[in-house]
Image (cartoon, grey):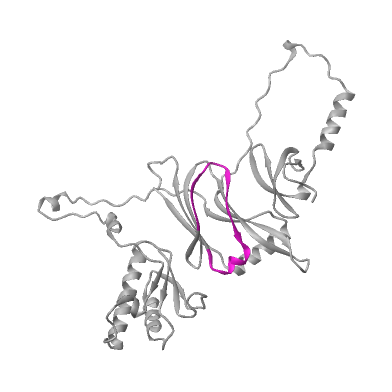
């Protein structure tokens, strides 16, 4: 390996010096230049010793003339480095390795949150597999900073890899939203294609835009209700209705033994009715809480419950799509439902 952690390096493009702080793989290292950390290919950097040696020789060859204090010109202000504000990104950095057949394969995905805006944010990050949270982090990110979050085993991208991040302004603004939640689901085929494109174009990361501009507060229409209140009508704040609802569940088991202790005397029609009522109840809670998805476990059996659920889902405008595919936890006995709001 040409470089080691702690080595001084020179960025060839900008002629700036820095240090190696992490060896990512045999082509990419993580470097730090003037307090900023970012990945770089090894052919984009070099050791600074030749530059230092030539500068020293040039200085020795031509000694500068003596300059008196009244001859020193005033230093001109340097123009500020241009920083492009293009939004907040989730970035995936593949870490490559060589397998037993001497082929280059991806071993890990290093996950970064990149804030390319002028505002600092508080954020809650969740990474999920098959709808279940695998990693969660609550932290803050400053303007024009990259934040390393964690690593993901690349073999896990087949397990319905998804991300959810809830942002809020670190310095709240009156006209800006109290928080902004965004999610990202990555299909295995998509990530494989992006890795091939990354290698072809010699790019260091795979970026996904989470948002370009933090959203404004949505102004709600207000109605004058004081006259109704004066006449004795009770006025309720509908915006606080969700505070009194039970929490939504991400996985719901509709097997009758999970829903009733006294079910053996029930007819098939009565059992199906109880199951569909629970299905409708959990669907309504998920929609009320703006949950992105839910899994309904209906079992295999003769397929009557599954068929009834699928017919109901086709008519619900909040349902974006649904899938009844093999899941290592439930086999073919569950349907995953995704919502649109």
Q: Residue at x 23, y 52 (%)?
A: 223
Of residues 263 and 159, which is closer to you in this image?
A: 263
Q: Is residue 292 magenta?
A: no
Q: Is residue 293 left or right of residue 104?
A: left
Q: Residue at x 27, y 84 (%)?
A: 270
- Which range is magenta? 135-161
- Picture coordinates of residue 201 (x, y %)? 72, 58
Of residues 172 and 161, which is closer to you in this image?
A: 161
Q: Which quarter shows the C terminus?
A: bottom left
Q: Which quarter of the picture shows residue 25?
A: bottom right
Q: Is residue 158 magenta?
A: yes
Q: Residue at x 81, y 14 (%)?
A: 66
- Picture coordinates of residue 13 (x, y %)? 75, 43
Q: Which quarter of the picture shows residue 263?
A: bottom left
Q: Is residue 71 left or right of residue 63?
A: left
Q: Residue at x 88, y 22 (%)?
A: 62
Of residues 119 and 326, which is closer to you in this image?
A: 326
Q: Which quarter of the picture shows residue 321?
A: bottom left
- Picture coordinates of residue 286 (x, y %)? 36, 66
| Vertical order, 1 against 297 (above or below) | above
| Vertical order, 308 against 110 (above or below) | below
Secondary structure that dominates the magenta span: strand
Q: Is residue 256 left or right of residue 325?
A: left
């Amino acid at each position: 390996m040409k470089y080691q952690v702690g080595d001084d390096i020179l960025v060839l493009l900008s002629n700036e010096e820095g240090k190696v702080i992490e060896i990512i793989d045999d082509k990419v290292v993580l470097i730090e230049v003037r307090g900023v950390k970012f990945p770089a290919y090894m052919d984009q950097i070099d050791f600074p010793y030749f530059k230092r040696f030539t500068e020293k020789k040039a200085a020795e060859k031509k000694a500068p003339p003596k300059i008196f204090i009244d001859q020193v010109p005033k230093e001109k202000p340097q123009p500020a480095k241009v920083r492009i504000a293009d939004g907040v990104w989730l970035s995936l950095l593949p870490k490559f390795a060589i397998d037993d057949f001497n082929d280059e394969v991806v071993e890990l995905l290093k996950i970064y949150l990149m804030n390319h805006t002028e505002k600092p944010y508080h954020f809650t990050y969740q990474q999920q597999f098959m709808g279940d949270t695998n990693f969660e982090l609550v932290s803050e990110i400053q303007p024009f900073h990259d934040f390393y979050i964690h690593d993901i085993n690349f073999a896990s991208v087949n397990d319905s890899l998804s991300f959810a991040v809830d942002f809020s302004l670190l310095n709240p603004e009156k006209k800006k939203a109290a928080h902004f939640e965004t999610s990202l689901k990555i299909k295995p085929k998509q990530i494989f294609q992006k890795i091939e494109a990354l290698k072809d174009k010699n790019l260091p990361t795979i970026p996904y835009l989470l948002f370009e501009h933090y959203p404004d507060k949505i102004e709600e229409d207000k109605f004058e209700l004081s006259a109704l209140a004066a006449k004795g009508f009770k006025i309720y704040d509908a915006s606080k209705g969700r505070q009194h609802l039970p929490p939504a569940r991400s996985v719901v088991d509709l097997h009758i033994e999970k829903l009733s202790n006294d079910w053996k005397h029930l007819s098939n029609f009565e059992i199906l009715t109880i199951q569909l009522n629970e299905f409708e109840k959990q669907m309504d809670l998920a929609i009320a809480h703006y949950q992105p998805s839910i899994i309904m476990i209906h079992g295999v059996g003769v397929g009557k419950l599954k068929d009834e659920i699928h017919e109901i889902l086709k008519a619900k405008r909040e349902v974006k799509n649904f899938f009844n595919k093999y899941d290592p936890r439930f086999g073919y006995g569950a349907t995953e439902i995704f919502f649109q709001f």
